[in-house]
C-alpha cells in the first residue's frame, strides 16, 4: 500500500504530523501543505505552500470575493491551481513521496486538482496526505480505494503517528 491519508476533526494536528514526517523522512518529497493565515489570534484565511520551491499563495481569505466559499472564506481556485496542482505535477514526475495536504472542501472546488489527486493515488509513488472527515462522492470514492489506508487522527495517537507513518513508508518501499 502506497497511499496514506490522515483524517480527523479540524485542528487535531494532521498538518503538524505531515510536517514532522517530512522532517524525519529520507524520501525526496514534493507536493504542498496548507497553513493558517492569522492576524494576532484571529484566523483570516489559509495559504498553500509548495514543498519543493517554497512558493506560496493565498488559498482562501476573508477578504477574497469569490463564487467559491467555505464559511466566511472566499476561495481562490486559480491561485491554488497555480501552486498546488503544479506542485503535485512536479512531485509525480520527480519525487518519491507526494504530500497532499489537504483533500478538503476548499481544494475540491478545483476540478484539475481532483484529476491530479486521482492520478497521484493511482501512481506507484508514495502518497501522504490528509482528507476531510465528512465525505462527498469524490472523497468517499477515495476512502473506499483498496490501495489507500485512512488513518483517523485523535488526541491519543497524534504524537505517535509520525514514527508509525515513517515505518509504514519504509516497509512499503516501491
Image (tube, rainbow, N blue to C red):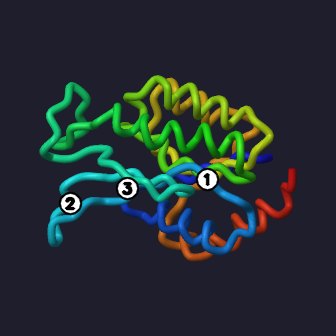
Total labels: the figure holds: 3
Q: Residues within 10 Å of mark 2 (few under 14, many from 20)?
A: few
From this view, report whether residue 2 is shown above or below residue 20: above
- Mark 1 vs mark 3: in front: 1
Q: Which dot marks residue 10?
A: 3
Looking at the image, which residue is at 86% across and 61% down? 171
Q: Which residue is mark 1?
A: 30
On the image, the x and y values in percent for residue 80 come to 39, 39
Q: Which residue is mark 2?
A: 43
SS of the residue at dot 3? loop
On the image, the x and y values in percent for residue 84 come to 47, 42
Looking at the image, which residue is at 58% across and 41% down? 88
Q: Is residue 36 left or right of residue 44?
A: right
Quadrant of residue 124 in the image? top right
SS of the residue at dot 2? strand
SS of the residue at dot 1? strand
On the image, the x and y values in percent for residue 161 come to 62, 69
Residue 8 visible, this orientation = no
Looking at the image, which residue is at 30% across and 48% down? 58
Looking at the image, which residue is at 66% across and 36% down? 120
From this view, report whether residue 25 is shown above or below residue 128: below
| Distance from the alpha carbon under mark 1 to that under mark 3 | 23 Å
Amino acid at each position: 500500500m502506497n497511499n496514506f491519508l490522515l483524517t480527523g476533526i479540524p485542528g487535531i494536528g494532521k498538518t503538524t504530523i505531515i510536517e514532522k514526517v517530512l522532517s524525519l523522512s529520507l524520501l525526496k518529497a514534493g507536493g504542498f501543505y496548507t497553513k493558517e493565515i492569522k492576524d494576532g489570534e484571529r484566523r483570516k484565511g489559509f495559504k498553500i505552500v509548495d514543498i519543493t520551491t517554497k512558493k506560496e499563495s493565498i488559498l482562501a481569505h476573508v477578504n477574497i470575493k469569490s463564487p467559491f466559499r467555505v464559511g466566511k472564506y472566499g476561495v481562490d481556485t486559480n491561485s491554488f491551481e497555480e501552486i498546488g496542482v503544479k506542485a503535485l505535477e512536479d512531485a509525480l514526475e520527480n519525487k518519491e513521496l507526494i504530500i497532499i495536504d489537504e483533500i478538503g472542501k476548499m481544494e475540491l472546488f478545483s476540478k484539475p486538482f481532483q484529476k491530479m489527486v486521482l492520478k497521484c493515488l493511482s501512481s506507484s509513488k508514495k502518497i501522504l496526505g490528509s482528507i476531510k472527515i465528512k465525505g462527498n462522492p469524490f472523497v468517499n470514492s477515495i476512502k473506499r480505494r483498496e490501495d489507500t489506508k485512512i488513518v483517523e487522527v485523535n488526541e491519543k495517537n497524534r504524537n505517535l503517528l509520525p514514527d508509525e507513518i515513517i515505518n509504514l513508508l519504509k516497509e512499503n518501499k516501491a
